[in-house]
Amino acid sequence: MKNTIRQVFHSPKFVVGFVIFALMLLMVIIYPIISPGDPLQMISKGSFLKPGVYFSVYDSINTNSKTIDLPEANQKRLANKLSDTDKVSMVQWLTAAGVPAEDIDMEDTTSLIKLWNEKYDPTVKPEGMTMAQRNFYKRLDKSLDNILNEQPLVVSAQNQETQTLDEIKRISDTDYVNLKDVPNVKVLPLGTDNFGDDVLKKLVSATKTSLLIGLIAGSIATLIGLTLGLLAGYLGGFIDDFIMFITNLFTVIPSFVLLILISYSIGQDKRGASTVAIVIGITSWVWTTRSVRSQVISLRNRDHVNLSKLSGHSLTSIIIKDILPYIASYVVMAFILQISTAILAEASLSMIGLGPKTADVSTLGLMMDWAMSYSAHLNGAWWAYFPVILVIALISFSLNLMNTGLDQVFNPTLRD
Amino acid sequence: MKGYRKYFGKKIVWFLITFAAAILLNFILPRLMPGDPVAAITAKSAQGISDASAAQEIYNHYAEQFGTNEPMYVQFFTYCKNAAKGDFGLSFSQYPRKVSNIIGSALPWTLALQFPAIIVGWIIGNVLGALAAYIRKGFDKVLMPVTLFFSSLPAFGLAVILMIVFAINLKVAPISGGYGYDLIPQLSWKFVRSVFTHYQLPFWSIVLISIGGQAIGMRSMSIYELNADYVKYSRFLGIKDRKIVGYVFRNAMLPQITGLALSIGTMVGGALVSEVIFSYPGLGSTILQAVSNSDYPLLSATTLIITIMVLLASFIVDIIYGFIDPRVKAAQFD
């Protein structure tokens, strides 16, 4: 046993897969400790907040500000306000005024504005430009100046008694607050989703639920598959025929269809995460049964099994002591595969609206489903779906990698 | 030819048995759902009617039309009789449209999308797997992790990624649908071109997914065969390498063909979800529609059609296998 484990950990593929999987598990366990709270709590109004650091505007006004003079500040401010069409117009004027094209860089707004301030002259009349166009450029230039008027902003509050606005504070364009002094700062590494939930927190809890679904479904499928395979292979005769009949039947009838029909007939209200896991489990045992049976048949007439039979050992003890150890490696591999297919099955099922009930838990499939039905992919809200796809892919990639590694250890012909 | 009769006869009997089981499951499972679907649609159309007897009247009318007032076994025989005629009753959600009509308009899209995609993916996957086994070294080292990663991606994940890259960022393909929104299905050059461009992304997403699993399976089979005794013996005899490789891959192909017959069901399942992502007007989208409107006649008919499709496909593959595998032929002369 010890030796086998050592051998398994010598396979680089298994180790890589194992490390990825262990990291995911660690993340699932540790992250909720660092950042406690209900993952399904709606924290933002409005959906699909961009990932980033959010700090309270209210608090930052009330925080002591310091004056910092940065030479680039104004240009950055301008760059933020300038629209793409304005930039295109500016480039057009500059080219018309005879600035060489290689000096103009559309992408670098700061340098574009610098260039504009140097070269723009309202009295110049570039060739072929109408009066209206020249006036447009005058307005554009003026609006750029207005953004930079360097007048302080006035913050005021309404007086309860007189209903007048009292000035509280003036904010000049060189005022800065230290982020550490602002009491309310929320870091949303992956933004929020369509409900306004913190995506990262939800993703971690969804990963946990999906892994559990995989584990439950995988255990059920492996258990059913193993039991049926052992019975069919070892007992033979009528029981074998009967089990194989059922197995062959469910091999050709697509399990996805069964999954749809059963989940549908359970009904939306009763479909919790564990129910879905059980349904997936009882529809995906056929492959395990087939392979366990064929291996047991080849073991059945080995000498050591016959010897046990002659010594009067019971059926269960023969199966446990003489047959199971020989197929254990295979069963472990099948179990690993079952976990990854179950996670994929849950996700696919959720995508067509047959996943677990949304209100209680989140699963990877449900997150994907909601992101898609709120067209996150069309709104450019990559944070709502891409991490989900990545996590699903990483889970099944790591499990598949572990499986290939095990396969190479136990199946010497495949070794490099 | 006489020898084949037993093999094909067995396959046909088996096909009929699975077919019967599929129909039975398709009939029973959706009807186990708690709640009365007829009551739901009565509630919809009887909105605002306060008279209880009038509402009851409407309920009875619908119950009669959908046949839900009969006992289960009578319903089953009517179902079988009607299904044989291609009549699956009326859809709940698109009442009074016929289920067979809805499926009839979705089926060609699914057939034209999935089977070519699965076969192309299977061929490419097998070629890559065989090459990886034969060349080993660098090619294998790069190809294996890549295919393993691709086969780990969920079908819908790959579909979304392809859509983001090619339809939204590069704008070289349309985002969704089976043809342009501004077109009516007809046999014009413009329509055919629109269908073709809409076909690309769903097609390649299914192909890429099926490549992975096939390549991995083919690689293992080929490596196994390359190490077999007959290969070593042939080398001792001095048979040309090219000829040996031919033998090896023919032997390795056989389990892959059986594998195709057995995995068509799983592949179709994944491909249906890809259809949903691209809003492709096929059976995947029909399932989504049926589920979200609790339309069980539509759902059960769609799943039945999918099951029949898969059963037929694996039956055909089995028949082809019978012709290819020399062992089947040999077994007939015993």
Image (tube, grey):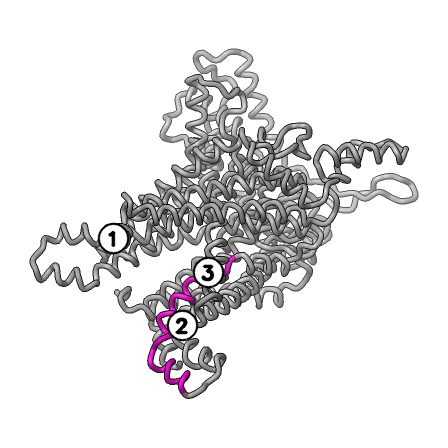
Q: Is residue A249 above or below residue A115?
A: below
User: Circle 1 sits on which residue?
Assistant: B333
Name the spot of residue A243 as percent of width and height, x first. 49, 62
Query: Which secondary structure class fits the magenta region best?
Result: helix
Q: Give, as a single range, the part of the protein colored magenta.
A: A284-310
Q: Check disc 1 and give the amino acid type.
A: Phe
For the residues beneath circles 2 and 3, the answer to whether they share a chain is: yes
Mark 1 — on which chain does it sit?
B
Q: Which mark is residue A175?
A: none
Q: Is residue B102 left or right of residue B172?
A: right
Name the amino acid type tagged 3.
Answer: Met
Nearer to us in this view, B192 or B17:
B17
In the depicted view, which residue is nearer to us: A167 or B61? B61
Q: CA distance from mark 1 to mark 3?
A: 26 Å
Mark 1 or 3: the one toward you: 1
Q: Is residue B216 above or below residue B93?
A: below
Q: Quadrant of the C terminus of chain B?
A: bottom left
Is B193 positioned to the left or the right of B48 in the image? left
Q: Which residue is mark 2?
A: A327
Other-residue count near label 1 (Cα within 10 Å), few / some / many at <14 / 14–19 / ≥20: few
Q: Is residue A385 left or right of residue B238?
A: right
Q: Mark 2 near mark 3, Cβ–Cβ under 8 Å?
A: no
A350 part of magenta stretch: no
Q: Which mark is residue A244?
A: 3
Residue type highlighted by circle 2: Ile
Q: Position of residue A279 (x, y in %)?
A: 59, 57
A296 magenta-colored = yes
